[in-house]
Image (spheres, rainbow, N blue to C red):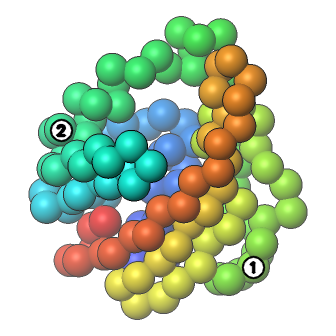
Amino acid sequence: MGNLQVVERFAKALSEEDFDTQDALIHDDYVLTYPQSGERIRGRANRRATIEGYPSRAEAGMPTSVGRIIGTNDDFVPRVVGPGWGVVHLAGSGDEFQMAGIVRYPDGQTWHFVFLLTLRGGKI
């Protein structure tokens, strides 16, 4: 599987809250940084423990909706998926990718996100 396919699978796994697939695509040395809060999460196990501490969409009364990345590399996706994660732009090649989109929270707030993804050995 090529790096673009890894990133596309990761985007889909985010939309579906599929933690097992996310874990399978993440390198052991994974680092997640939230610059707005200063949080830094190192490693697959710590990431999963942090994410699983948040209520799932089902627990929050939000339906799961899965979108798909439409178009070719570096094209914008014309629609945003319902509550939860929605990827609206994916660009990159080789080992470096950028993914941007929105996250809708149960209280109705919408936040924008940007992932700067570096792949090594076929993993994020």
Crowd band around label 2 with a 10 angstrom C-alpha radius: few (<14), some (14–19), many (20+): some
For residue 116, say whether it is visible: yes
- Residue displayed at 65% across by 82% down: 73
- Residue displayed at 53% across by 9% down: 59
Question: Is disc 2 placed on a helix, strand or loop?
Answer: helix
Question: Is disc 1 placed on a helix, strand or loop?
Answer: loop
Crowd band around label 1 with a 10 angstrom C-alpha radius: few (<14), some (14–19), many (20+): few
Picture quadrant of residue 31:
bottom left
Q: Which residue is mark 2?
A: 46
Q: Of the two numbered discs 1 and 2 on the same chain, state the one appearing first in sequence.
A: 2
**Above or below: residue 34 compared with residue 66:** below
Residue 25 spot, x, y in % from top left: 31, 57
- Residue displayed at 64% across by 50% down: 112
Q: Is residue 82 left or right of residue 84?
A: right
At label 1, which amino acid type do we have?
Asp
**Is the C terminus in the top left, top right, bottom left or bottom right quadrant?**
bottom left
15 and 99: which is toward the camera: 99
Q: Which residue is mark 1?
A: 75
Residue 95 spot, x, y in % from top left: 36, 84
